[in-house]
Amino acid sequence: MEQVEQSKSRGPVPGAAPVDRTVVRVEQVGFAYQETPPVLEGLDFRLEEGDFLVVFGANGAGKTTLCYLLSGVIPHIWAGTRRGEVSVCGLDPWSVPMHRLASHVGIVLQDPEAQLAMPNVRLELAFGPANLGLPREEIFARIPQALAAVGLEGFEARGTAALSGGQKQRVALASALMLAPRLLILDEPTSQLDPLGNAEVLEALRRIQGREGLTVLMTTHNTQDILDLGLGTAALVLDRGRVAAWGPVDEVLAQVELLERVGVQPPPLQKIWAAVAPDLNGRAEAAASVACLAAAIRGGLEAGRLRVREIARPGEDGGGAGAAGAAEPPLLEVDGLSFAYPGDPPVQALRDVDLTVRAGEFVGLIGQNGSGKSTLVRCLVGVLRPQQGAVRFRGKDIARFRVGQLSTRIGLVLQNPDYQLFSISAEEEVLFGLRNLGVPPEEAARRTRAALAEVGLGEVRDVFPFRLSFGDRRKLAVASVLAMGPELLILDEPTTAQDYHGRYLLAELAERLRAAGKTILMITHDMDLIARYARRLVVMRDGEVVLDGPTRDVFAEGEVLAATKLRAPLAFRLGQELGVWEPLPLTVDDVLAGLGPAG
Amino acid sequence: MQSAFQYVERATFMHRLHPVVKIVHLFATLALVLLPYRPTLRDLASAAIWVALGACLWALGRVGVRQFGFLIKFLTAIFVFLIVTQGLLYQSEGPVLIHIGHLEFWGSDLGTVTVEGLFFGAVLSVRIIAAAMALPLLVTTTSASQLMATLRTLRLPPRLTFMFVSSLSFTHLVIQMWQNILEAQKLRGFDIEAMSVWQRARRAYVPVLTPLILLLFRKGNDLQVALESKGFGSTGPKTEIEVLPFLPRDAAAAAVVLAVFALTLWVKF
């Protein structure tokens, strides 16, 4: 079997003979939820004590189902039909109640909000062991150890509601560790976090990796970070429920073509290396870091094996329509905007913010959670009324418009489409906003058809929105905003909880709309994505705009970005390290276009 | 946005008080409210004494009146409604305050407002104030961990204790979701806050309640996974994490609450 062949080098051995230290045994397992096609097919692997398996796969590949199968969530909470054998710590999750599995298996889910049940950290951590009747003294002794393991020393008395996303997820991790499980399952633990939260959780995982007696299975889309931190002893790639690749993490993540094919983002360094390696005859270790890769490429250039090509990117001025953007009159002007949320004391969310957006621009708005991005856009769409300053749209103060009226000028696509979907069909969902605005029925029907076609949902106009995939629900949310005809479209975090291809769906759509004459303002934490599309970046920190300029100029401000806990995309940093391009590359594609074989 | 019914950390006497005393106050309030009442001065005085005790306890716990602004507005509307309707509907032989004609409705003469009717509405309103003051006092001055420990000490089933405490913390999440949904629909020209009561009742809540219910199902599923994976379904004995001592000052405070309760009963009967 191919998996067996691949796994001989190191890491867990799929299909190998059982050994005493086996923690997970999965033999020819298939699974289907009730009345759905199979989600998993022919899975066959083992994990031994101390293994750390990282599972990659596009959304719908079966990652979460695998986590649920091993933790007993299936069949005790979600029902379905299973084939094959599953054994976790010698128990069959299918026939053992979940509370019996609890002392063997811990699980951490994606959503940091929904998995903390207790009001403070101490009680949250004590919850599991107390349920199992462990002695109080032992529980109290474990709490500081679990918090230290995730880097949250001294957080015992903190209220869980007041924690950041990254802290909540680390508390969830510590809470799972409190039961001293032999198997820890993490289902995309960083997918809903900002870069800071992502780094905090991954650092916590790096700390617990190799803990005696602990086996870890983690699903993620985050390939580059996994490589950079050296997380995982083995990797498994799932494609539509089947094993597409298995083996040591670096070897699996070096299979760039396979990863692209199954919808997993190849680590950018690996992707660049895979493209230039045939001309360099170098070692795979060259892709270990930006500095290593830069050194290898530099060697190739000096040896005459590679040559530098010019990198061309249009519209560097920040305007989507090239230099014409600067000549356009301002579409949106933010003048001295300040906003504080009421409280004791009030929370100052925006401080004297100035911003001008011109027609046809694609502007990226970046910054950590809590920097004021969302408050700013909520002021722009009239949901919040600023205490100081003004927002003008085409020269008119927006304070004179109601939110509904403003939505025909400025449209906001929210991060979570499920906050707005309620209608019986996709078509009705789009019509809802138009009816509220009093648009005549024929005109509303025409606009609805056009908007659904624009986002590629014309064929599913009669489908109940909650039957659509998350990506399609997001597109539907865009359609419902687009139909209202705004000139300026604001997208709030379009990449959250999305896989490789899903991340680019809305961004590609936004770029198409910009090309068709709309103006785009996109909030995101995804530097690779924003580097690809935005010609101008606005960076916020503590309620203030700290940088505003063309994308490359902003990325060149390394110190300011570092103070904001942001980092330029890898391609840009590689360009800085090499110093052979002007302008510097923004994306992996730029780097690949900027390098060619000699002769 | 913070839920009004949420613990606020402060160093006050009420915060230090054993939660059992506050629970005694809550149950005494319930008992008082459930007792039959009449439109008499004695009933009004009895309810007013209990409200006065509640006001003292609120002051001792520095419970913010402003954070219950929505509740006060709502109750004010209820009081006006009660006093007016009871004034019009209450049948008595007592003195008539206003006589504006005869209008028979379900055996009542809507054209006659009696003093006794208004009194009946007033007694009812004061009793509602007394009832409304008790729960905020308990939940804003008692941390969830203290509450859990106390409910367990009172031998409530752990599942019930957890449901009560987690519903308090879930309130925060529900309010957040509610606000997000309101905003999302407002962005599509659907402004529930700008609608009349009639418009809201007729069509307003479907676009808000539907996503809320669907989201709650999803969050509930995640929470269930989190709880079950931490042995929540275990039937064995559970460990008490927090043990709260019952001090002499707690006994004294409980005695004061019970004494005032006895006084209200004496005044009433």
Image (cartoon, coloured by chain):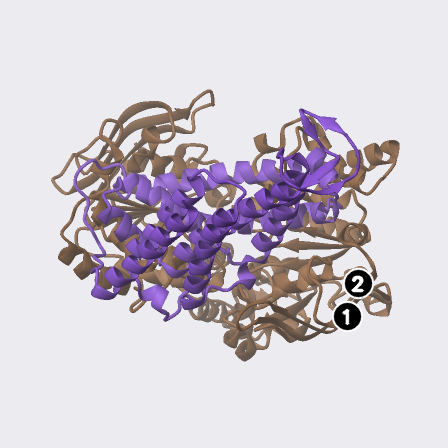
Chain colours: A brown, B purple
Residue at the image position 39 percent from the left and 35 percent from the top = A65
Which residue is most to the top?
Answer: A35
Q: Are there few (<14), some (14-19), or many (20+) residues within 10 Å of tag 1? A: many
Asked whether residue B172 is in view, the answer is no
**Among the 4 quarters of the image, the one containing residue A148:** bottom left
Q: Label 2, secondary structure: give it.
A: helix
**Residue closest to the eye, B17 or B190:** B17
Quarter of the image that includes the C terminus of chain A: bottom right
Quarter of the image that includes the N terminus of chain A: top left
- Residues at marks 1 and 2 on the same chain: yes
Q: Position of residue A518 (x, y in %)?
A: 79, 53
Give the mark nearest the N terminus, 1 or 2. Answer: 1
Residue B129 bears which disc, if any? none
Residue at the image position 46 percent from the left and 61 percent from the top = B55
**Among the 4 quarters of the image, the one containing residue B222:** top left
Q: Position of residue B34 (x, y in %)?
A: 43, 39
Name which residue type carries label 1.
Answer: Ala
Q: Position of residue B60 (x, y in %)?
A: 41, 67
Q: Taking B74 as reference, is A268 left or right?
A: left
**Residue closest to the eye, A155 or A538:** A155
Name which residue type carries label 2.
Answer: Ala
Q: Chain of mark 1?
A: A
Which residue is most to the left?
Answer: A20
In the picture of the structure, the residue carrying the numbered disc 1 is A390
Say if A467 sits above or below A489 in the image. Answer: above
In the picture of the structure, the residue carrying the numbered disc 2 is A399
**Residue closest to the eye, A568 or A291:** A568
Q: Taking A195 as reference, is A106 left or right?
A: left
Say if A472 sits above or below A176 in the image. Answer: above
Which residue is most to the bottom?
Answer: A559
